[in-house]
Image (cartoon, rainbow, N blue to C red):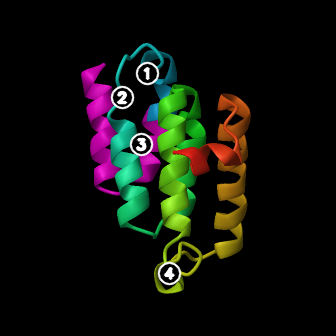
Amino acid sequence: MHLIIGLINQSVYNKMFDIAFEVSKRFMSDLLKAKYLPIFDSIFTQFMEDTTRYEAKLALMLNIIPLMTKQTAARFMKTIEGVLNEPASNSIFKNNLNPMRVGLMLYRVLEEVQKEYAYSDHSTNLM
């Protein structure tokens, strides 16, 4: 189990999101049994520090939504709120090849998190 989590974590750290996606998809049943997943710390750091490769990051997030807790979902929403508040020069829409696709994928991920964890737009205002 630790090897799988470590592999996903290292893949995210090295910006190899395709490997992280495939490993998390293949070992989802094992990951669901884990009590703590440092994967989310790594991916949230990547979301904040690097505004490139958002299609891959969002595809990975869609894949690992079942592993989230309500607290993790709240952290994700706050992270995305911070990313969207970035100035235009560092925008996720400017730093990715297909900004329309990034926007649609972001909308889909946010919709899934809201639906799965009953997270409303008022929750970010309270935190």
Q: Which residue is mark 2?
A: 37
Q: Earlier in the sequence, mark 4 or mark 3?
A: 3
Would you place residue 48 above or below residue 72 in this image?
below
Residue 10, position as x, y percentages in the image:
27, 44
Q: Is residue 17 magenta?
A: yes
| Picture residue at 33% right of the left edge, 46% below the top | 42
The image position of residue 29, as x and y in percent, is: 50, 17
**Residue 109 picture location, percent across and down:** 65, 47
Q: Which residues are magenta?
A: 1-23
Q: Nearer the viewer, residue 1 or 114?
A: 114
User: x, y (%) of residue 83?
Assistant: 50, 65
What residue sits right under mark 4 in the picture? 87
Label 3 sits on residue: 20
- CA distance separating discs 4 and 3: 29 Å
What's under tag 1, amino acid-wise? Leu
Look at mark 1 in the image and give the residue it sits on. Answer: 31
